[in-house]
Image (cartoon, rainbow, N blue to C red):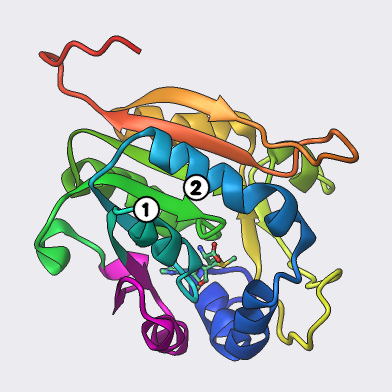
Amino acid sequence: MVSNFSDQKIIDSWEKNVEPWVLSVREGEIQSRVLVTNHAIVDVVLAEKPKTVLDIGCGEGWLVRELAAAGVDTLGIDAIPALIASAEKAGGGRFKVLPIEHLSSQTLGETYDALVCNFSLLGKECVDQLFQLAPSLLKEGGSIIVQTVHPSMGGGEGYEDAWREESWVGFNRQFSDPAPWYFRTLESWVALFSRADLKFVSLREPRHPETGFPVSIIFVGMKVSEHVDICR
Ligand SMILES: C[S@@+](CC[C@H](N)C(=O)[O-])C[C@H]1O[C@@H](n2cnc3c(N)ncnc32)[C@H](O)[C@@H]1O
């Protein structure tokens, strides 16, 4: 039996919620995305001036389409075949069914200027695994860019790394079987970069225009070798 708190349970839940998710994203029903986080992630990625991007956990593919339209060769991968089918149907980018758990430089056969994860690092072991793998997926000087829930908002049950229940509260559509997610403190997010020998480059806190509070956090890390001189 799949535990209620596991990376596999996240995938099982997302499999059941493809249709409401696609409609919520494409109809612009998630206010924080429309007002803040969509353009925040696009701005941060384009500021890195990548020629090639891997969008990890791309969902129905909106970010791949945005980046491709800006001239960036982008591949989107996701664990859920129906989400990738919906992305392929919409077109405007390259897509592949590939769970993080099966990700490697061999399965992709290419490396990237940037890896982007937009609200898709929800699990525990698979996220640790992704960070360990990230340097092998990146070109020298390439970036890993992660947007996630701001740690100040997710610690309601105590400020420590732990599984949380998702609720889908606030969504208009009929979602079912909420996916769990693994909460990480700010310190734990930063530690993921240093454990993977990725240079921690910057942190942004996109804010809600009305409340002034951050609605997300964006981390940028970079693959650097000892001999590369970076001035940033
Ligand atoms: C909140 S959605 C974000 C989707 C997309 N990045 C966006 O901005 O709309 C989370 C996504 O992560 C994907 N996901 C969750 N666990 C995954 C895993 N282990 N491997 C690949 N994708 C995963 C889900 O299928 C879902 O598409």
Question: Which amino acid, mark 2?
Answer: Val
Q: Residues within 10 Å of mark 2 (few under 14, many from 20)?
A: some
User: Which residue sits at x=50%, y=35%?
Assistant: 219
SS class, disc 1: loop
In the image, the segment drawn in magenta is 76-102
Left or right: 109, with 64 as reference point: left
Q: Are marks 1 and 2 in contact (CB under 8 Å)?
A: yes
Tell me the quadrant of the picture where the C terminus can be found: top left
Q: Quadrant of residue 88?
A: bottom left
Along the line of sight, which residue is nearer the eye, 232 or 167?
232
Left or right: 157, with 193 as reference point: right
Residue 103: in magenta span = no
Residue ID for mark 1: 70
Q: What label sits on residue 37 in the rendered view? A: none
Which one is earlier in the sequence, the residue at label 1 or at label 2?
A: 2
Along the line of sight, which residue is nearer the eye, 69 or 190?
69
Q: Is residue 2 visible?
A: no
- Counting from the top left corner in percent of width and height, residue 217 is at 62, 38
